[in-house]
Amino acid sequence: MARCRFLSVERKLQRGDKLREAYIQFMDEYMEMGHMEKIDESESHSRVCYLPYHPVIKTSSSTTKVRVVFDASAKGSNGKSLNDILMRGPVVQGDIFTILCRFRKHSYVISADAEKMYRQVAIANEDCDMQRILWRSTPSQQLESYRLLTVTYGTTPASFLATQCLVVLADQYQTEFPDAFKAIKNDFYMDDLMTGGESKE
């Protein structure tokens, strides 16, 4: 199924140079940043899942116009998807209404974004083979297997894993950076920070 979906996307990409180039650039960056690795075909694992994926064009984005969406809800040969067997995890951040109300009370405000937040969080080595993909940049190349090494957008626990990582980091550095601890615990909504204080300092 992942192979069929890849070949279908690949045929569509051959029709437009700009989209194809942006897609290849996105995948090259994924590899260069160490967010995926090529698999040695001699390796054998008992738990393996191949994810189909496709490009999504976001014209409103000022940075990345093309993103890749991994479909962890696609059913495999056993009739189950990766998302069917993963736990969601609890919500560990406050609700957006409360965060925005608190944000409006500050005399001075700061907003920030955790860049590529999901991809900043590594997956345990033993779980990476559940996030395999097939990839090649041109149809003339051989189709090869890769595994994604970081939290993958589109998987059921992705949002919990990323936000829980922030919570754990805040807890670890609470005594060293008490103000940052409070901001991370109270003023993050997903990857967006909305906080402030009564003075610039």
Image (cartoon, helix red, strand yellow):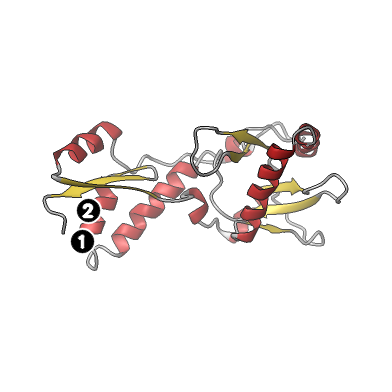
- Give me the residue at 13% from left, 45% from top: 107
- Give me the residue at 54% from left, 43% from top: 64
Residue in the foreground of this view, choosing between 87 and 129: 129
Q: Quadrant of the C terminus?
A: bottom left
Residue in the foreground of this view, choosing between 160 and 115: 115
Callout 2 touching callout 1 (CB < 8 Å): yes
Q: Residue 182: which disc?
A: 2
Q: Quadrant of the N terminus?
A: top right
Residue 61 position in % (x across, y down):
50, 37
Q: Is residue 143 above or below residue 98?
A: below
- Dot 2: element: helix
Residue in the foreground of this view, choosing between 99 and 138: 138
Residue 119 position in % (x across, y down):
52, 52
Residue 4 position in % (x across, y down):
80, 34
Q: Residue 21: which disc?
A: none
- Give me the residue at 25% from left, 51% from top: 183
Residue 178 vs residue 155: left or right? left
Using the numbered discs, state the Cα–Cα distance from disc 2 to disc 1 in whole angstroms.
Answer: 6 Å
Residue 45 position in % (x across, y down):
73, 56
Residue in the foreground of this view, choosing between 142 and 78: 142
Q: Which residue is mark 1?
A: 178
Residue 171 shows in the view:
yes
Q: Is residue 39 above or below residue 61?
A: below
Amino acid carrying mark 1 in the image: Pro
Estimate how packed mark 1 is, as few (under 14), some (14 to 19) or many (20 or more) residues with alpha carbons within 10 Å.
few
Residue 133 vs residue 42: left or right? left
Q: How many marks?
A: 2
- Give me the residue at 59% from left, 35% from top: 84
Amino acid carrying mark 2 in the image: Lys
Residue 173 vs residue 35: left or right? left
Residue 45 vs residue 148: left or right? right
